[in-house]
Amino acid sequence: MADIAQTLDFDSYWMPFSGNRQFKANPKLMVAAKDCHYTDADGRQVFDSLSGLWCASFGHGRPEIAEAIAKTAKTLDYVPPFQYAHPMAFELAERVKNIVPAGLEHVFFTNSGSESADTAIKIARAYWAHRGRPEKARLIGREKGYHGVNVGGTGMGGIPGNKAFFGDMLTTEHLPHTLIESNRFTRGVPEHGAEVADVLEQRILEHGADTVAAVMVEPMSGSAGVIVPPAGYLKRLREICDRHDILLIFDEVLNGFGRVGASFGAELFGVTPDIMTLAKNLTNGAVPMGAVVTSDAIYDTFMDTERPHHAVELAHGYTYSAHPLACAAGLAAMDIYENDRMVERAAELAPYFEDQLHALRGAPHIVDIRNLGLAGALEIETAGEDPTYRPWKIAQAAWDRGMYLRFGGNTVQLGPPFIAERRDIDFMCEVLDAAIRSVD
Ligand code: PMP
């Protein structure tokens, strides 16, 4: 164990989504980050196979971002976002608007993906209320979906382990997921299963369209292990929503800004939602920030509703919405995104990543390999009772071999930085192969 670990009080920091007891026995401490690597407390270079948590995709330690944050901290540390603003908020909103698919025109800032999900849900409900249809309030998510951990997103999400013990979050129901056995080991977008979308129509007809506000899905489900929507599936969801006058929300917190090999899942699949949620790469992970982007129809409904001139249109927002440091980081990140052709880089590396990932098929315990853009997952055969045991062991073995590897449910997940080279992908897959072979 590194010397620094001996000096820390492990009980005072309650780590999120972590095995706290297990961490104490084998602490994994990062002390620096640059490009595609962390430096751990022992001074080892550790390859970052998930861009942090899918958020530092343009590479760690970008000096442009660091300088923008430092400059802003000295000159404009904070501005109240209620009734007051600063120019960077408008500048970043315009940049985001220009990047997302046409039709999404108005940007509301949050501080995380979870806040973006809950904000999107509230906007959807308030939209129908402002249109005189408050009974259109029912929310539909999807099994295996992940929309963060706040009350709305927990309810909309469909990963059972994330809901246990919390009681009622938000009453929602869930469409079936699209993980279909006949699609196993598909490279990229699976062929089978567009018709799974039709369950949405059945649900709408059961309940009556006049009770349904919105459907929320991730185009590609990330946290549940890179579940790629079958060809035609999202288009079908869009058509059903249009037929019944229901809002379609895409959670692009993880998909967005190049991860799927296109700017957004919406762009890749040719489907524009009414609301899109963002976070993660928006600041390249350097400062917490999220965003919700809506159509004109939604924004105009709020702006045009009859009320006193000084009244707020949406009683929602955070002390740190559009925080100056986050906006500064976001503007610098968007410069990198555009000037360094991040989407193109991700798209150029993606076929090589796909080849190397699928070459792991010969390793033991692999039930499925899935990928899209620079996102990939290996589904691991369950050993005994606990589906997470073997993925956890594989992640430990990867750490011992100099790689940070994320596990979740019965999967291990890959999301290398877009600046990775082919040799980094080779290293990543060699470590994975050895790590998988090292566990029973
Ligand atoms: N939505 C999706 C699709 C995500 O992948 C995540 C984070 N993994 C979130 C929401 C939550 O984001 P945060 O952890 O920033 O709250």
Image: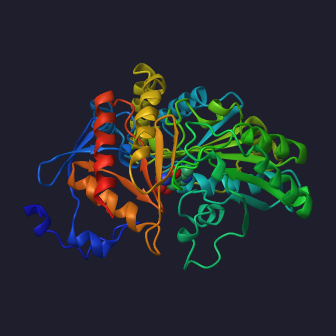
Front residue of this view, candidates 143 and 390: 390
Residue 126, compared with residue 273, is above or below; it is below
Q: Position of residue 62 (x, y in %)?
A: 30, 33
Which residue appears at 47% of the width and 28% of the height?
Answer: 351
Where is the C terminus found, in terms of image quarters? bottom left
Where is the N terminus found, in terms of image quarters? bottom left
Residue 112 appears in view: no
Q: Is residue 195 left or right of residue 61?
A: right
Q: Position of residue 409 (x, y in %)?
A: 48, 63
Front residue of this view, candidates 439 and 20: 439
Which residue appears at 57% of the width and 36% of the height?
Answer: 188
Total labels drawn: 0
Quarter assignment of residue 230: top right
Quarter assignment of residue 207: bottom right
Which residue appears at 38% of the width and 49% of the height?
Answer: 363
Q: Position of residue 362 (x, y in %)?
A: 41, 46
Residue 63, compared with residue 28, is above or below; it is above
Residue 132, compared with residue 416, is above or below; it is below
